[in-house]
Amino acid sequence: MGFLTEVNLRDRFVLLEEILARRYEVEERMRLRATLARGGETVAEITVLNDVVINKAALARIVDLEVSIDGRYFTTYRADGLIVSTPTARRPTTSPLAAPSSSPRRERSFSPQSAPSR
């Protein structure tokens, strides 16, 4: 059982019996594929369930982040970082930037956020 499994501790054995009897549902979730490219060359590529965090390193420096969605240019952000998350990760308790709860079953979701400067 994964970390997203909704099981009460007292019900774990009953639920495990249900799983072994193949009486369960699999809930599909949106995933993100992030590709890091420099000078037209792909440096890294990863597929994730929750979120992708892009930052410059230990020292906050402003960088230009060109964002494409499904291979098409979307926009360029001038920032010290960027967080892109799926509806699974966007819960009010996980981040001060979290959007109102949305269904993790959604296929697409967009809610630009910005952190307050301190």
Image: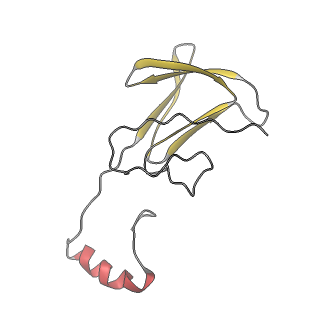
The answer to which quarter of the image holds residue 6 is: bottom left
Q: Quadrant of the N terminus?
A: bottom left
Q: Is residue 66 left or right of residue 26?
A: right
Identify which residue, 113 or 61, lies in the foreground. Answer: 113
Residue 32 coordinates in the image, percent (x, y): 43, 38
Residue furthest front as drawn:
100
| Rendered image coloring scheme | secondary structure
Residue furthest top as drawn:
39
Q: Is residue 55 above or below residue 78?
A: below
Q: Is residue 69 above or below residue 30?
A: above
Residue visible at 29% across and 57% down? Answer: 27
The answer to which quarter of the image holds residue 64 is: top right
Q: Is residue 42 left or right of residue 64?
A: left
Residue visible at 31% across and 78% down? Answer: 16
Identify which residue, 97 or 15, lies in the foreground. Answer: 97
Q: Is residue 37 left or right of residue 62?
A: left
Q: Quadrant of the C terminus?
A: top right
**Count of labels shown?**
0
Q: Is residue 63 above or below residue 60?
A: above
Residue visible at 65% across and 32% down? Answer: 81
Residue 62 coordinates in the image, percent (x, y): 72, 23
Residue 91 coordinates in the image, percent (x, y): 50, 54
